[in-house]
Amino acid sequence: MILGPQEELLTLALEPADDPTELAARLREALPAPGTGALILVDLFGASPANAAAALLRDRDDIEIVSGASLPMLVEVLAARDSGTARQLAERALAAGRESVRDVGGIIRAAIHPAPEEVSR
Amino acid sequence: MPVTHMRIDNRLIHGQIVVSWIRAEQADVLMVANDVIARDDFQRSILMAVAPPSTPELVLSVDDALAYIASPEHAQERVFLLVKTPADAVRLVRGGLPLQTVNVGNMAFVVGAKRVSNTVFVTPADVEAFVALRDAGVTLTCRMMPTERNNDFMKMLDSAHLLSTAV
């Protein structure tokens, strides 16, 4: 809807009955050859998918894992994916995640009803 | 009663534990009792890294967990205790851990396991361990989240026709 179909992008789900070690195995199989690097985005820090991804770090030093996955983060890394290493993409994901958290209500209210000192100017 | 909550969960520390259970039980210490992970520096570091910053965490072998909880020094601590398997729960109870209730959280499907609920699958060996816990006077409950009611886990095993073969 925003960026169109994407290649080399895989989504994996952990269902209630699934064993997280099996998710780690599916992740391991899905990774490109060592040295190519990959960025794994997960939702909650400390949750089973994040822990399963973390387990891959034992054998793979070329992957990065970022939690707090969000659409702004995904859009940022997909747009920048050809221009950086997994580490650089991880940095962009972290920045995009932080910058996208905004107080929409506060911003719009401030625009509609400017603070008194601003009105007086 | 130093152990405020004991949970069997093959995922050990994960979202439900970090977000809901620790707060609900107001635990002072989050303890994982597992012989394999206690010996494996890599797995231990992952578990230590994901624990909520508000709650100190210990990853110990089953024997060390028993020693820690039995020590008078830690008598006032509220321990939230996690094990992967009912067999480890049996070891803790036989090792002298006073437990009234053990809660069954996630038990993922493994080869040979039968379905008890959407999130709990048990092997014949698991059923034997649950029977041993019951016979030791432990009440078995099944709750994913702290807000759920205390389902009687032995009844669930019975309803799934898994109890008769083991008793």
Image: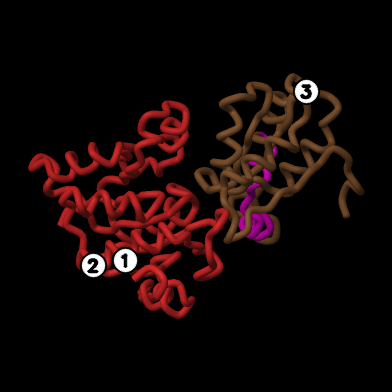
Chain colours: A brown, B red
- Kindly identify the amino acid type of the residue bearing the numbered disc 2: Asp
Q: Nearer the viewer, residue B39 or A78?
A: B39
Residue at (47, 77) in percent of width and height: B161
| Residue ranking furthest to the left | B72
Chain letter for mark 3, please.
Answer: A
Q: Is residue A101 magenta?
A: yes
Give x and y (percent) for residue B95: 19, 48
Q: Nearer the viewer, residue B29 or B11?
A: B11
Residue at (68, 39) in percent of width and height: A27
What is the quadrant of the N terminus of chain B in the image? bottom left
Chain letter for mark 1, please.
Answer: B
Indicate the secondary structure of the residue bearing disc 1: helix
Asked if one can make out residue B148 in the rendered structure from this viewpoint, the answer is no
What is the quadrant of the C terminus of chain B in the image? bottom left
Label disc, if present, on residue A13 of the rendered structure? none
Q: Is residue B82 magenta?
A: no
The residue at which mark 2 appears reads as B135
Question: Is there CB contact under 8 Å for labels 2 and 1?
Answer: yes
